[in-house]
Image (spheres, helix red, strand yellow):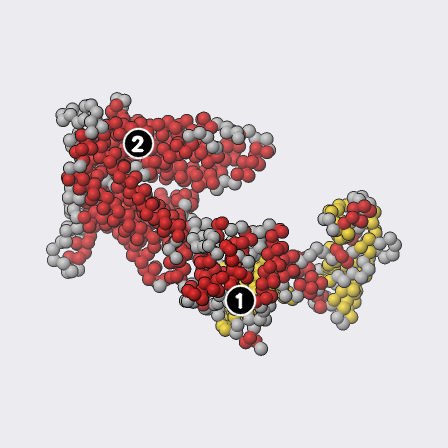
Amino acid sequence: MRRPFLGWFISPAALVAAGFLLAMAAVLQYAFLAFIPGELQPGGFTFQNFREMMKPLYAGVFYDTVKLCFLTAVLALLAGYPLALALVRARNPYVKSAILIISVTPLFLGEVIRTYAWIIVLGNRGFVNGTLMALGVIDAPIPLLFTRLGVVVALVHVTLPVVVIMLAAAIAHIDRDLERAAAALGAKPMRVFVTVTLPLSMPGIIAGLTTGFAWTFSAFATPQLIGGGRVNMVSNLVYSLGFSSFNFPFAAALSVAGLVLTAVALAGFRLLLRPLHKVGLS
Amino acid sequence: MILAFRLLVLLLLAFVIMPAAVAIVAAFEPRPIIAFPPQGFSWRWFERALNYEDFRIGFAHSVFVAAIASTISIVIGSMAAYAMDRYSFRGKATLEALLLAPLAIPHFTIGLGALILAAQIGQSRGWPVVILAHVVLVLPFVLRSLYVSLKNIDPRLEQAALSLGAKPGRVIWTVTLPALAPGLAGGWLFAAILSFNEFTASLFVTSQRTQTLPVAMYNYVREYADPSMAAISALYILLTTILLVIANRFLGLGRILGTEDGRH
Amino acid sequence: MAATDALRLEGVTKRFGAVTALHEAWLKVQDGEFITLLGPSGCGKTTLLNLIAGFLEADAGEIFIGGKLVTTLPVWERDLGMVFQSYALFPHMDVARNVGYGLRARGVPKSEEASRVAEALGLVRLSAMADRRPKQLSGGQQQRVALARALVIRPRLLLLDEPFSALDRNLRTEMQLELKEIQRRLGVTTIFVTHDQGEAMSMSDRVAVMSEGRILQLDTPEVIYGRPAHPFVAGFIGDATVLPGRLIARDGAEARVEAAGLAFIVPAETLGGAAPGAAVSVYLRPEDLHPIVAGEGLEGIVVSRAYLGDRAELVVECGAAGRLMLRLPGQAAMARWPVGAALRVGFDGARPVAFPA
């Protein structure tokens, strides 16, 4: 087979890939170097960083992060599925565009603005408390900011768009004739949904769940600003170790552990959900 | 049941919109606090936000970084996407995996890696590392949208051009590239918006001298509580929504994102 | 009795925006009949099928299935068996679960489901494939599973939406015969949609030829071919040579027309109100034309020919009359009339039809 311009076409991309690989290699290398307090240059080879991570303080953050990621991914999936279904199946093109724009705009707003907006919603004088107090439902503000609940709600909001896109892509691939066939065979809409649409959305559900998990794991500003130090995720720990203590080796080790953890979690999801995917739910 | 489903979708859409709407309303609060409901109506925070030095500089930096990073990404990405879609070659799977990997790797890890790498080669906190980090982060999105566009080009068009005697370079220039144009425009816009908004990795790799707008905004939120941030958020939300509506109108956002219903 | 018609349409109309996809369709189908909706793409046949199935809602008119008004009844309450062009087999279920789907939807007990599924799979000769996935089957097997799935619920109406279009030629013929045989054996009333006239002619009791959202003619294949009621039907079904001519005289059910200097007897019913002297178009079938040695006919030159094995098609240029198409036994035609040969075309025994021009 002739492949004109192959070298020209892939060399620049290969260069970027090499840069990325080097950056990841740098993280891996630092993870095994000793931290010398007061020095920016790391010391020699050591396992100390990983030993340090076993301390309850750090292990607890990992445990918390995984729990938050999982909860967020599941909630984003539950909230995202109806949106994705409505997006794909809307007949009116204006309704379709509106759902699409509304569901994906947050994706393009960036984490800082979305998180800031949630601060306004959740603050003591914010939208929720302000409205409830103005309506006389409550007398004093309910604490929402700097709570787990607040962080989870904001994380779900941050993760939702990408989950909707994943689900919508999968739902769009379902052959409508399959649902028509089910209806023609006497299945009522709910039965069609449960026995045909839902099982065939399984690839999107798995993709949505894993991507939702990975995105939540990557979130930094949301837990930082809404958690306000009371809800800490791995990302916050990495940042504060790097920029407050200048302990880059430990920050690198935490990143490596985070990557391994995400990889294990994602592989676990796939393994867990694969039989479901194969057999279908019907 | 259909009614209940519609109601549910409306509620979810309201949940998605609500924070943005709340931020826009809060921007008009005349007092220097965030409070609901607002007491009056004022443009003063918009004025302050637009005149705030860090935001102005951050905006210029973000435009600069987004323009360069998205242009580099689209050039590199289109060539790589073409090669990976049409050719098979050794190391293709590895290259593709490496280019798409940043989708699954936390931005703080990529930021940290870029920072350490830059320090090692003495390029600490200059523009090159910021731009490299942005290219690495937006390239997967560019590749995905270009794959979709490439798949939608009828291969017979290229075969027809070849059979008419056009050399491969001419075919790419006169057939493939024009057919790819909407995908390229969409991919570029996509990349530019993502780069403009990138925050976590930027927080690691930028310095005071290269601070982008999201980083400036983050620092502002940490230090001040007045509605200036709400004002700039409102402007931001408006601008992004307009861009997306335009992108949807002319490029078909659903096609780029792959959420279009293929069969009816 | 109208009430016992298996299917009855009364003025069913469907519009999509400004486009009327179906104009007032009237149709009566008897129990056990095999009816084909035939026409080019965009003629409204699929719209009509979707209206019968209930995937679309009619803007006007009523639909009765087995005497029961179903116009506004949802799909799942219409008791239909439907085979889709894509077969629409559920990829996440094996063959047996696919076939049993309609039974489960109806709450049929498990044991009865198993026996009826086995029976249906036996009917389509796929008993050995019960635990395969659709992807593991050939196109013809998938088709038979789709048929079994539609028949196992004992539908009041079997709807077939171009079910053979994805099969190659040989398999298609085989499946047509098999389907026809099963249909006859079960006596299930069948509505079949196709754009393939050969398929329509060979399988149907009656054919509804459709164009631009209208049913132009509904009759047996013989009548559709031999006595087309509409110029579109005459042109769409089979091959036809059209000669411009003139109406000479009308005489009860018959009329005399003149074309290319020759006289023909045609049925009068298709001429509408045309008066003697009016311009008409005369439609001749290839088998109406044959080469003659002497006698009344047209002189022409063979301009092209196509050899089709058992027969050959010759196109003969006949001066003012234009090009005529003849169908002849293959070997003889190839030996005697190469391109460029002179040929005299005769019309003995021709039964053309004519329409007002």
Q: Chain of mark 2?
A: B
Q: Nearer the viewer, mark 2 or mark 1?
A: 1
Horizontally, is C266 left or right of A232 in the view?
A: right
Q: Percent x, y for residue B74?
A: 40, 34
**Going 50% across and 73% down the picture, which residue do you hit?**
C68
Q: Nearer the viewer, residue C254 or C54?
A: C54
Horizontally, is C272 left or right of B85 in the view?
A: right
Which of the labelled discs sits on residue C157, or is there none? 1
Q: Percent x, y for residue C12?
A: 53, 67
Which of the labelled discs sits on residue C112, or is there none? none
Residue B2, picture quadrant: bottom left
The extreme left residue here reads A140
**Going 31% across and 58% down the picture, which residue do you hit?**
B8
Q: Which residue is mark 2?
A: B133
Dot 2: few (<14), some (14–19), or many (≥20) neighbours within 10 Å? many
**In this rendering, do the residues under marks 2 and 1 share a single chain?**
no
Q: Amino acid at mark 2?
A: Ala
Q: Percent x, y for residue A282?
A: 39, 57
Q: Quadrant of the N terminus of chain B?
A: bottom left
Residue B68, picture quadrant: top left
Q: Secondary structure at mark 2?
A: helix
Name above or below for residue A129 compared with residue B205.
Answer: below
